[in-house]
Amino acid sequence: MFKDLDPILHSQLRLAVMSLLISVKEAEFTFLREKTNSTAGNLSVQIQKLKDAGYIDVIKQFKDNYPQTICRITKPGIRAFEGYVANLQSYLGKG
């Protein structure tokens, strides 16, 4: 039987952000924007949804008098991502 896919992660941009963060643990907003080829506004909305779900932490600070936003994956985020991948593999007959 097919398992439910996490609706938070089942968005292309949110999944892309999580895929990047799972490998680097944390990243600046500008890095995520460049890698996902998204607009700043759309990325901000999707990052907020991931934060509200508890999947990432968002740290806002200043670096050389410029605002800096850093996103960091949380332990629940890692578990959710790994569960999403496992459930997706069941659809592909690999789980």
Image (cartoon, helix red, strand yellow):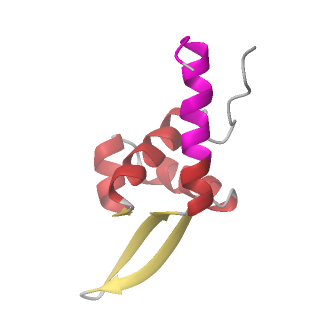
Name the magenta segment's main secondary structure.
Answer: helix
Comparing 93 with 11, the one in front is 93
Residue furthest to the bottom: 65
Q: Is residue 75 magenta?
A: no
Image coordinates for residue 12, horizontal then vertical, percent: 51, 33
Image coordinates for residue 21, horizontal then vertical, percent: 41, 54
Locate residue 55: give its quadrant.
bottom right
Q: Which residues are magenta?
A: 80-94
Q: Is residue 63 above or below residue 2?
A: below
Image coordinates for residue 26, horizontal then vertical, percent: 38, 64
Residue drawn at (54%, 22%), measured in percent from left and top?
A: 89
Comparing 34 with 89, the one in front is 89
Q: Is residue 92 magenta?
A: yes
Locate residue 67: give its quadrant.
bottom left
Q: For this view, does 35 lie left or right of residue 38?
A: left
Locate residue 10: give its quadrant.
top right
Residue furthest to the left: 64
Which quadrant holds the N terminus?
A: top right
Q: For this view, does 95 lie left or right of residue 2?
A: left
Q: For this view, does 56 lie left or right of residue 16?
A: right
